[in-house]
């Protein structure tokens, strides 16, 4: 067996997302329900002009799906008798508008382009970029995101920079090397006060490489990373898809026949290129809830020597299994899903060992500085976010159950009146992973300026915050335990530079907090960040969209028992010292066998819950957004 196939401790391989074969014992792949179709996937349409309409879809593991769940709970009057089934994909227009998240959803520019574009044959914008500033951008890139796209050596980037400013007489320019340099400079610029150079450089790359789109290369992976940092997830997805097709066209997924005198470095470059792409394609497709273009079923190339990339590949294999077996099949019971979730997280048992081997740090190691700290942050946040998405469906299920149980007619019959211990444990794992994400990123942002200015971390902080907010909405007296975590996330977001996706994330969280209870709004310390001043006009724009009487049905059980001002952060992050004692995080433990053996545990089926549809025809995507009595508002 090839090393690239190794996944289980016993050497067995797992089926991959989108593969034709499925793991033994799994139910069939999901099919649309024949009698009741509800799900938490979302779509929306953006009309740029009468002749330009853009419709996009995001699946149940996406950030947008959870935000839409929260939106529906906020606007619902929770009345009975509206047993209208919803389509397989729900319209998210209203939730996007409420949370001011339309720009992120569609990836449209957040401000007018300020660059003056010259002709394709001239480096008009580049000529005004000083060598000193270009070097700052390059060093920022090589100290951060380069670790995810290390297709070429650092020395090759430095040589390209030298050639850009001091070309040798008669030397021919390497077009792809030139483009990769400019993309590196663009990504590096985003982490500095000169971030507007990012789009200028990116536009230049598109002008140079546009006519060469059909030539096989994987330079598009760097396009994807740039767009991700700019909060343009759909563009990232498209670039990764193009890069995947080009990698397959070039045969990077197979070991190439040795050419006479081929250097060992070129072999490692091929392996590094493919596996870096495999990780990012697998991961990004999963967090958007969309199918992946690459499958291990087709791979015949060894893992690279790079230990950091080997650890990322391990994560990608866990994610591929999660996407396939958890979200790609229907399940007969919630307990079956719990067993599967535990089995998947069991695959993570050796992860910390791999992390130690890769960078010499573990999940509980204090945030480090420099490039090591960037690598540590990537490995840590990916781990906790994967755990969060594994158990988030159980959190949504419990929230819907708690809401349903508030009605007096919902009691009786065979329905359990209390959540079984294993369901609460699953929810605690989701909440604990969210808290761990917030804690680590908050501390890492203080310790490492390179980490603080990586824009993509706003996604992790936002996703963790909304998971905690969802639990806050449906539980009782949870403000004192939940709000400090949300405030810590907002504080960390506020320390980042202005602009999206950070601005939209802060506005969305503040909108929900104010709708739950005006006193829940986070009040930033004076002078923390000027970008916060412009949030409130956006937040208040939608403050009258939800009638107070409707929101109050959610507010009452969540009223705080302690004055909220005591939960606000001051200068720095004083609440971090109390994180270890917070009951939310205490519920999180590393993957383990957990509650019982699973053979004698109380199961939950739809007949037990009193929900009138056939559970055996349902799947995770259609099950975890159960609103049998509520019609989704669309405007």
Image (spheres, helix red, strand yellow):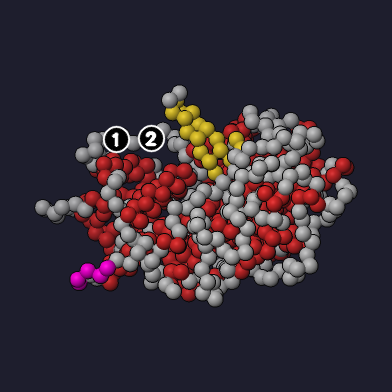
- Residue 573, given in percent of the width and then of the height, sits at 62, 56
Q: Quadrant of residue 331?
A: bottom right
Q: Which mark is residue 117?
A: 1
* Residue 532 seen anywhere in this rendered image of the structure: no
**Which span is picked out in magenta?**
257-261
Give the residue at x 75% y 36%: 83
Q: Please determine whether, in this image, residue 353 is positioned above or below residue 160.
A: below
Left or right of 323, for residue 153: left
Give the residue at x 37% y 45%: 198
Give the residue at x 66% y 37%: 86
Q: Of residues 131 and 359, which is closer to you in this image?
A: 359
Q: Name the residue under label 2.
A: 113
Q: Of residues 561 and 47, which is closer to you in this image?
A: 47
Cβ–Cβ below 8 Å for labels 2 and 1?
yes
- Residue 119, given in percent of the width and then of the height, sits at 24, 35
Dominant SS type (magenta): loop
- Locate the C terminus by quadrant: top right
């Amino acid at each position: 067996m090839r090393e690239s196939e190794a996944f289980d401790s016993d050497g067995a391989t797992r089926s991959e997302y989108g593969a034709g074969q499925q793991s033994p014992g799994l139910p069939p792949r999901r099919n649309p329900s024949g009698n009741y179709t509800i799900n938490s996937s979302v779509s929306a349409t953006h009309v740029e002009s009468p002749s330009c309409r853009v419709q996009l879809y995001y699946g149940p593991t996406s950030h947008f799906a959870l935000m839409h769940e929260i939106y529906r709970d906020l606007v619902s009057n929770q009345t009975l008798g509206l047993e209208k089934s919803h389509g397989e994909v729900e319209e998210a227009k209203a939730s996007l508008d409420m949370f001011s998240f339309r720009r992120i959803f569609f990836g449209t520019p957040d401000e007018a382009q300020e660059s003056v574009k010259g002709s394709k044959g001239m480096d008009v914008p580049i000529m005004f970029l000083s060598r000193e500033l270009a070097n700052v951008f390059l060093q920022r890139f090589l100290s951060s995101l380069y670790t995810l796209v290390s297709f070429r050596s650092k020395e090759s980037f430095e040589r390209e920079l030298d050639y850009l400013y001091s070309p040798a007489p008669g030397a021919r320019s390497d077009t792809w090397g030139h483009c990769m340099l400019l993309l590196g400079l663009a990504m590096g610029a985003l982490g500095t006060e000169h971030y507007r150079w990012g789009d200028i450089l990116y536009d230049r790359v598109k002008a140079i490489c546009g006519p060469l789109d059909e030539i096989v290369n994987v330079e598009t992976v760097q396009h994807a990373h740039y767009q991700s940092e700019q909060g343009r997830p759909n563009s990232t997805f498209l670039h990764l898809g193009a890069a995947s097709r080009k990698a397959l066209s070039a045969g990077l997924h197979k070991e190439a026949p040795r050419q006479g005198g081929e250097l060992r470095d070129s072999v490692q470059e091929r392996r590094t290129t493919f596996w870096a792409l495999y990780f990012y394609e697998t991961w990004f497709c999963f967090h958007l809830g969309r199918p992946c273009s690459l499958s291990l079923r087709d791979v015949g190339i060894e893992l690279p020597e790079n230990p950091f990339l080997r650890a990322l590949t391990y994560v990608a294999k866990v994610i591929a299994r999660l996407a396939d077996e958890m979200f790609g099949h229907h399940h007969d019971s919630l307990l079956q899903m719990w067993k599967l979730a535990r089995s998947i997280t069991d695959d993570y048992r050796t992860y910390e060992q791999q992390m130690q081997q890769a960078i010499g740090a573990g999940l509980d190691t204090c945030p480090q500085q420099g490039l090591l700290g960037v690598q540590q942050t990537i490995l840590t946040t990916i781990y906790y976010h994967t755990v969060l998405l594994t158990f988030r469906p159980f959190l949504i299920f419990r929230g819907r159950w708690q809401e349903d149980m508030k009605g007096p007619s919902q009691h009786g019959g065979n329905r359990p009146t209390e959540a079984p211990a294993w369901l609460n444990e699953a929810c605690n794992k989701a909440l604990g992973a969210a808290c761990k994400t917030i804690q680590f990123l908050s501390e890492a942002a203080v310790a490492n300026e390179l980490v603080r200015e990586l824009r993509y971390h706003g996604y992790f902080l936002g996703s963790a915050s909304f998971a905690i907010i969802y639990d806050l909405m449906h539980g009782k007296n949870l403000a004192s335990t939940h709000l400090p975590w949300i405030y810590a996330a907002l504080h960390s977001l506020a320390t980042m530079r202005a602009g999206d996706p950070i601005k939209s994330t802060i506005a969305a969280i503040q909108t929900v907090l104010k709708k739950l209870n005006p006193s829940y709004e986070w009040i930033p310390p004076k002078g923390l960040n000027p970008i916060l001043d412009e949030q409130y006009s956006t937040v208040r724009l939608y403050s009258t969209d939800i009638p107070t009487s409707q929101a109050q049905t959610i507010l009452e059980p969540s009223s705080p028992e302690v004055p909220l001002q005591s939960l606000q952060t001051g200068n720095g992050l004083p609440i971090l010292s109390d994180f270890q004692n917070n009951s939310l995080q205490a519920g999180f433990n590393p993957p383990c066998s957990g509650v019982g053996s699973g053979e004698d545990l109380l199961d939950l089926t739809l007949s037990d819950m009193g929900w009138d549809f056939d559970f055996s025809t349902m799947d995770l995507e259609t099950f975890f957004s159960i609103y049998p009595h509520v019609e989704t508002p669309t405007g």
